[in-house]
Image (cartoon, grey):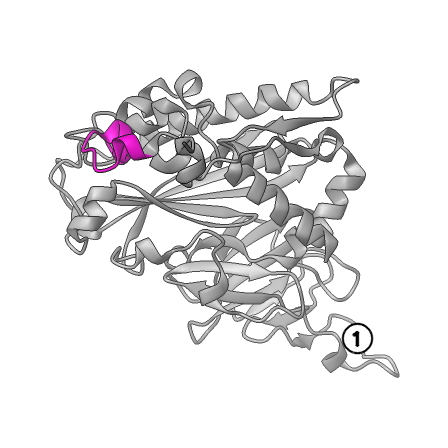
Amino acid sequence: MLDKTDEIEYFAMKEAVPSLPASWYYDPAQHERELKAIWSKSWNYVCRSDTLDERLAYKTITVGNQNVVVLRDREGALKAFYNTCRHRGSVLCTEKEGKLGSALLVCPYHQWSFAADDGRLVKVSSFEEPAGFDKADYGLFPVALVEWRGCVFINLDPTAEPDPDALFHRSSENLANFPMETMVVAHTWRAEVACNWKSFWENFNECLHCPSVHPELTELVPLYGRRIVNPKDLPDWVDHEGSEDPKYRGGLRDGGETWSHDGSAQGHVIKELTEDDLARGQTYATTYPSMFIGAYPDHARIVRLLPLGPEKMELQMEWLFPQETLDDPSYDIKNVVDFAIMVVEQDSKACEISQLGLHSAPFEGGVLMPEEYHVRDFHTWVKAELGK
């Protein structure tokens, strides 16, 4: 008689798989390789477009060691350029965000001026233009930009073709009924984490750590207390097929409505959502290497990461709500915001202690366990990008 595990497919891996080499998490040369092969050729999340709500408003973002300015031009269109003057390389916008005083990007060093709408060089500060010099040859370097449902992405690859439908590695299909275009950023949080950027994604992609690192989260999402992310991650999943117990079916605990300290949506469930959307309780879309979206019955959360070095990264979280929710003075946004910050700070601490251990001289690399198949898939993606 066949064993049940031979008859019924489950998601977990059947064999041990080696993890990435330990040196890939701290070696400066490897970090530079990843910046060039991955970060400089991927769509990286910048901001919500409504945070650039005025014409000539701008934000700057640094991807690795490349600084880019994203702005809204005189006609209201979004544009992106390397934040570099074509004279002798000075940055143009020295602040992280602001508003241009005119429709020109003016270098603070020698006052070369570039048109905000197309980056062309408009004027120089020299008393005359020398022979052989043509302003048309010295426009700003453009950066590819695409907007998806109010989210702005850039790509440093000059051959990148904007395709909003190809942005996500983990599908955004379950976000279809969320009013992403009209939801408003109500709070932003940033922190630096002393770990390699890949460590963050590995932690995101498994729940072996959840019971010991996230006691509050596993209470809200009982399935996570079983150290898995999907009901079919264990060989005995069929024994519980059809169960209404959230420990086996997934989703939020009974009575839980959203990601918050008390699980309450405070009467503000997003009206566009279907019964299936509400039953999921949480859904995620990811685009490597820079961001994921977590969507819940009353809000959405965008998490962005940027590499600051081989062993340091920046995390940013933005919380989005329907405007009518924010207009209710009784709605306690801290119930939502503080819960997510707690979870991410717990994750950050776990990533940091993992980073410290990677430097052990005899440790050349680890091993992935059956439940870590999403980590395996992430590693496969990293290696594929490096091999291109």
Check if residue 242 falls in the magenta segment. Answer: yes
Q: Residue at x 19, y 36 (%)?
A: 257
Figure quadrant of the C terminus: bottom right
> Vertically, is 162 above or below 191?
below
**Which residue sits furthest front?**
1
Quarter of the image that includes the N terminus? top left
| 359 or 83, nearer to the observer | 359
Q: Nearer the viewer, residue 216 or 142?
A: 216
Task: Determine if residue 198 is in view.
Answer: yes
Reading the image, the residue beneath label 1 is: 127
Q: Quadrant of residue 195?
A: top right
Residue positioned 22% across, 49% down in the render: 277
Q: Position of residue 98 (x, y in %)?
A: 49, 54
Local packing at callout 1 (Cα closer than 10 Å; few below 14, some 14-19, many 20+) is few
Please state the extent of the stretch shown in magenta in the rendering. 238-252
**Residue 321 x/y as whole percent:** 26, 47
Residue 168 in the image: above or below residue 289 = below
State the SS at label 1: loop
- Residue at coordinates 73% horizontally, 41% vertically from top-left? 31
Left or right of residue 261: residue 286 = right
Query: 385 or 53, which is in the foreground?
Result: 385
Residue type at the position of mark 1: Phe
Q: Any magenta on residue 290?
A: no
